[in-house]
Image (tube, grey):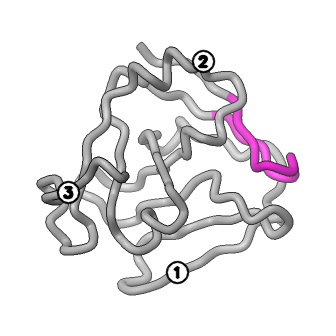
Amino acid sequence: MEKTYHGSCHCGSVTFEADLDLSQPTYRCNCSICRRTRFWPAIARAGQFRLLTGQAELTQYLFNTRKNQHYFCKHCGVRCFGIGTETPTGLMYGVNLGCLDDVSDTELAQAPITYVDGRDEHWDRPPVVFAHL
């Protein structure tokens, strides 16, 4: 069931809200950026993510194909969300579950996780080892 969640970076400079269904898959990936930042996103489609404050406090990082936009707070360095610009389902926002202020521990524990092998660009299957993700 879809619910509106509120979130922020660690210092509170960036705030947002997102309409998410945490009974749907969330993702853990072993690619270089997700592994290093421990990014755990749920997916919001266009119109389901709203940046409330802090647009000017964000810095964007692009790498590799430069298709996905990775945003970090300039002050605390937290990655609240990213934008996938070329995905099989179109524009989407990856909302970092660790940045949600009003999600319960129970909701997080029950959220299904899909593991993807982004490091080897096998987006359709999990990596051989994924317990560390």
Q: For residue 68: magenta? A: no
Tell me which residue sits at (71%, 41%) in the image.
16
Vertical comparison of 32 with 122: above or below? below
Secondary structure found at label 1: loop
The magenta stretch is: 6-17
Queried whether the magenta region covers residue 16, the answer comes back as yes
Quadrant housing the N terminus: top left
Identify the residue at horizontal 75%, vertical 43% (top origin). 8
For disc 3, the marked residue is 129
Count up the numbered dots: 3
| Residues at marks 3 and 1, CA–CA distance in whole angstroms | 27 Å
How many C-alpha atoms fall within 10 Å of the one at disc 3: few (<14), some, or many (≥20)?
A: few
Query: Badge 1, how many Cα within 10 Å: few under 14, some, many 20+?
Result: few
Percent position of residue 103, x then y = 61, 22
Residue topped by disc 1: 62
Q: Is residue 57 left or right of residue 46?
A: right
Q: Amino acid at mark 1?
A: Leu
The part of the image, by quadrant, that contains residue 104 is: top right
Q: CA distance from mark 2 to mark 1?
A: 32 Å
